Image (cartoon, rainbow, N blue to C red):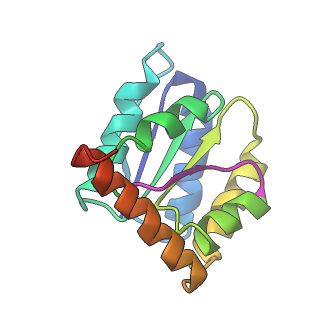
Amino acid sequence: MFLIASDHGGLELKESIKNFLEGRGIEVRDLGTMNGDSVDYPDYGAKVGRAVSLGEAQKGILICGTGIGMSIVANKFPGVRAALISDEFTARMSKEHNNANIIVMGGRVLSTREACDMVAAWLDANFEGGRHQRRLEKIAQIEQDVRQGRI
C-alpha cells in the first residue's frame, strides 16, 4: 500500500498522482489534505514519515509547493529515505542508489505529466544494492548514533 499526502500547494497534483497510481492497480491511502484550505505541511509530512518509519506502509509520496518542506519533515523519522525529485533521472536514481521509500515533489513546479512520469520511473526502478547498500548502512548507523546521543 502507498501513502500519499500533500498540503494545499500540492493538492491538485496529489489528486492526479493518486489517480495515476490507482490506474496502475496500486492501493493508495490518502492522508490529506482534502481541500484547498491553507494547512501546515509539517502536519502532513509527519503522517507519512511516521507511518513509513513504523513499517505501517512501505512507500509514500509527499507533495507541497516546492517539495522542500515535506522532504525536511519526512527525513526526521528513523529509517525514512525521502528524496526530493525533480525529473525522471532523479526519480530513478532515488530508487536505484538510495532506495528511497518516500518521494517528494513540488506541486507548484511540476506539471501532472512530469510528475506521473517521475512516479513511474521510481516505481519501475530497482535498488541496485552493492556499494549503495553499504552507504545506506552507514546512514542507518548515523541515525542510531544520533538517537543514542553519540553524535
Give the residue furthest to the top: 38
Q: Residue at x 69, y 67 (%)?
A: 93
Image quadrant assignment for residue 149 = top left
Q: Tell me if residue 83 is in the magenta stretch.
A: yes
Image quadrant assignment for residue 107 = top right
Q: Tell me where residue 54 appears, x and y as whole percent.
A: 23, 56
Image quadrant assignment for residue 5 = top left
Q: Residue at x 63, y 27 (%)?
A: 65
* On screen, residue 78 above or below 32: below
* On screen, residue 124 above or below 54: below
Q: Tell me where residue 80 appears, x and y as whole percent.
A: 40, 54
Give the residue furthest to the front: 150
Give the residue furthest to the bottom: 130
The image quadrant where one finds the N terminus is: bottom left
**In the depicted view, which residue is nearer to us: 83 or 145?**
145
**In the depicted view, which residue is nearer to us: 37 or 140?**
140
Q: Residue at x 34, y 36 (%)?
A: 46
Q: Tell me where residue 100 appears, x and y as whole percent.
A: 52, 62
Could you tell me if residue 72 is visible in this image?
yes
Q: Main secondary structure of the magenta part?
A: loop
Could you tell me if residue 120 is visible in this image?
no
The image quadrant where one finds the C terminus is: top left
* On screen, residue 143 above or below 9: below
Q: Which residues are magenta?
A: 80-87
